[in-house]
Structures are given as C-alpha cells and as structure tokens.
Amino acid sequence: MKKNRTRRLVTAAAVVAAAAVTIFAARNDFGLGRNMEITVNMMRELSLNYVDPVDPDKLMEGAAAGMVSDLDPYTEFIPEKGMKDFELLTTGKYGGIGALIRQKEDYVRIAQPYEGSPADRAGLRIGDKILAIDGKDAHGFTSEQVSNGLKGEPGSKVRVTVEHLDGSQVTCTIRRERIAIPGVPYAGWVADGIGYIRHSDFTEGCYEEMRAAIERLRSEGDLKGLVLDYRSNGGGIMQEAVKILGMFVPKGTEVVSTKGRSEDSKQVFRTETEPILPDLPLVVLINANTASAAEIVSGALQDLDRAVLIGQRSFGKGLVQSTRPLGYNTMLKLTTAKYYIPSGRCIQAIDYSHSQEGNVRTVPDSLISEFSTRAGRKVYDGGGIMPDIRTEPEYISRFAATLYAMGFIEDFGDEYTRRNPCQKIDIRTFSITDSDYADFEAFMKDKKVPYESDTRRALKTLKKAAEEDRFADLKVQFEKLEQELKDDTQTNLETYREQVMQTINNDIVLRHGYQAGVIEHTLPTDADVKRALEILGNPAEYARITSEQDTSRK
C-alpha cells in the first residue's frame, strides 16, 4: 500500500514537472526545465530505491525549503507544522496559560508566569515543579511535551499539578486564554517629567500598546520629555511602525517608502493621524540588535530631526518581507522590496543580490552614499542607523551569562526564595547582601562551569601557532603562564562578582515584579538612559544636535 502511494506521489510530481518543463521551454528557459526534471528523477530514485523507507512528503518539503536556502536569510518556506510559531512571531499571541517554562533534571518548572495571565492568577510561581498535566504524570517530560500540554484553544481547560518551592503540592484547573505577549513591557518615569518606554517588538497591535503607555504617562504627570528604548528590538510589522511615527510627526508626513524589482512597484507610506506629541523632545536608544521596523522608527525620527539617537550603530536590515499562501496551510515568506526612510537612504548592510553564487558581502565604503536630514545634517546609507551620540555597549560577562544559561542563577534564586518566603523588596534598589553572595559561592563549589576565559583561549591559540612554527623554546614560558593564569570557577566568582550579583538580583526581582520589575530595577544604572537624561535636561544641546551635528559613519 505504502509503495503504491509513493509511486502515485512520484507520478503526480512528474506530471507537475512535465507541465513546468513545457511552460519553461516555451520561455526558452532550458536550464530551469532541466533542473525540474532532475529533481523529480532524484525524488523517484530516493523514494523507490533508497536502502531505508523514506517519506516522499518530507522529501518534497525539504526540496521546498532548499529552494530558498541560497537567498537571503529572511526568505523561508513555512510548512504547516510551523504556522503556529509564525503566527506567534507576527501577532505575539497564542492559546495557553501564559507562562515560560524550563527543564531541570527530570521535571519541567515554571520559569516565569506573565503578569495577569491565567497561570499567574492560578498562583503558579517561578520554580514550581510541574508534576502532572490533566492527570498524566509529567516525570521525564521534555519542555516541548509540557508546552504542548499547556497550550490549547482559548476557553478550554487544563488541570495542572505543581509542587511549590516550600514542598507543598496543589492541583488547579486553569482556563486557557488568548495570551498576548506585550510589545511594550514597561512604561514609567526615569526623572521628573521624563518618561521612558521600552518597546520590544513590532507585533500586531503594538501601536495601541504604545499609545496607551503614552496616554497613561500623560495622565500621571507633566510629560516634558520621552525616552523610547528600541535596543534589541528586532522589528516586525512595518505598518505598526508607520502608525507609531504618526504620534510624533505631522499628519501626511512621508516616513518610509518601499521599492521592489520593478520601477512601478514603489509604495509611499505617510502618517494618517494627527500627532499627540508633535513637539515633545524625544531621545531614542538603539544598539546593534535594533533592526527592521525599529530602524524605520528610529531612522525616520532622525531623518526628520525629530529625535536624538543614542547608542550604537543599528543592525542594518532594510529589506521588506511579504507572505504568500502556497495552499494546504503552508506559506512562503519572501523578500519583496527594500525600504527607504525620509532622507531617501536604504540602511541595508548586507548585499544578498548575488547570494545564489555564494557572494554575500557587506556594502563596501565605495558604494556608501551621503544623504541629508530635513535640517541638512549628513547621514549615510548602507550600514544601519548611526546614532547622533555614540556610546560603548554594556556587555554582561560571558562567565555570568554561562551561569545563567546553565540554570545556576535560577536554581540559587529558588534556594533564596525558600529561605525568604515572605520577603518584601524595593524593586529599584534591591540587592543581595555580601552574605548572600557568599552563600552563592558555597552553592557553586561542586558545580562544573564549562567556561574558558578569553586569555586562556588566546593562550591556546598562541601555543598551537608556536607548535606549528616550531618555537619549542617557548613551551616553558607557556607552561608558566598557564600556571599563573587563574580562571577557575571560584576565582571567576570574585573577578566577575558585580555582574554575577546583578544577574542574581534580576532573577529575584523577576519573582517579585515580573519583567517590568526587572526593567525598572536596571534603569538607574543604565548608562544610555543617564545620557538621555542629560540631553533632555539641556534644551540648547538638544536643539544643537538636531540641527547642526554631522551624523558621520565612524
């Protein structure tokens, strides 16, 4: 039966290919028709003669994915099984209980309930061990299995048994809802009259979230300036960016245009609403992970001299993607155009035009062009958005990041919470004590951390190069350096003490104040935010930057 089904699929594919060959032959495209025939012949041989049984459906799905593999990384085939993830990516919504989870040993635990979600209202907390789902023992379940069990149609119910950190067990019936991951996770005040909004992505409806955040700030006090944080915002829906820009620039302002392969494909997008903050001083924070729609907002505000940009050069994604249904609940997401911000520049940093020949490169300096903002300031294309005020990025140490990635920070956070079950904290000022950190050092004594310092890695490279170059007399010196080089776990816990403490503090604040609490906790020490406050507190400097400064390409 299966062999007959395979033969029918291959025959059907051959018929399609034959039709395609006829069409392409009529267009004098012999090469394309030839390769279509080769593909069908290859599928037939694999389906009928490969040593083990193969699924022809998966062969064809792989062929569809391979068809776009040599194009840019944003063009992709989305199979039916990937449609839910794609919907979540574009809408930020899914049906479930609203909690992040993590694997620890033989159980999956709650890593973070979203504030106000069904999981949060049911009393699930960070560290809770998931013992059963709908009566099924969850021992040994993977994160994927637990996720599939917790997700479902909004309105349906799921029964979850958990063990709290204090050892008590509870079973609760939770009604699933349409969970919306907030595009604006935090809005608050960073100084007298200065508001701050963190915007994390451009999913469907983020304009309404942004507008609501601004209206709330205006209702709470006299809004004299605003910091928009687009750091590490990877973008999303371009139309949401256009609507957000409409809050800050005059109605009818051209904020972005797109152009595809043909000359008549150009589209111009203008703001359609009267601005609610037409003159309010703005500072926009960007970094190397600010991309796509986030670059449209930040770049347009710069081109229109409407804001001061602070941070690092942005990612440089000036490509527009569209979706095309392919039938059977599959989709093609493909790059259809480039976008251009008001000065006329396209900030795309990577040239994919010859990617099928394996030639992908950054836009060379020789092809970089100069443009002007509305006030005449110089800006450039071909490499992201360059901020008006450049700052050094603040990195967390690889050692602290490794501790977090391996779950040691969260595990210690569980222990800390067990010892301090009724603790009340000040979100902004909380910090563990030196005694708490000593407890963490003791907690880490028997833990293996696969961390290697940059110095040791460089020394290994140098040793290898010396061996290849036969510098045998350096061996003793290298051995001496290795003996003196201390990057064991306990030493690193002291070397990176400040950053590890910061990571622990964030984990504990998360348990009390959710994601918004962590953002609020980090604001007082954020160097870019401090710089933003300096600019907003100096109207003369703000005016000078938005009218005179040369935004160079350094």
Image (cartoon, grey):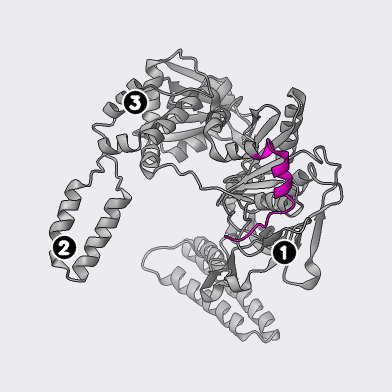
Instruction: State the SS at label 1.
Output: strand
- Give residue 125's position: percent from left, percent from top: 49, 23
User: What's under tag 1, amino acid-wise?
Assistant: Phe
> Which residue is label 1 attached to?
371
SS under mark 3: helix
Please report contact status of discs 3 and 2: CB closer than 8 Å, yes or no: no
Q: Is residue 107 visible?
A: no
Q: What residue appears at the point 43 percent right and 26 percent down from the top-left corner? A: 127
How many angstroms separate mark 2 from mark 1 (CA)?
Answer: 54 Å
Q: Which residue is mark 2?
A: 474
Q: Which residues are magenta?
A: 535-554
Question: Three-letter amino acid code at disc 3?
Answer: Tyr
Image-quadrant location for residue 459: bottom left
Q: Residues within 10 Å of mark 1 (few under 14, many from 20)?
A: some
Of the image marks 3 and 2, the number of the one nearer the N terminus: 3
Is residue 224 rendered to the left or right of residue 398?
right
Residue 552 counted in the magenta span: yes
Q: Is residue 12 above or below residue 179?
A: below
Q: Secondary structure at mark 2?
A: helix
Q: Nearer the viewer, mark 3 or mark 1?
A: 1
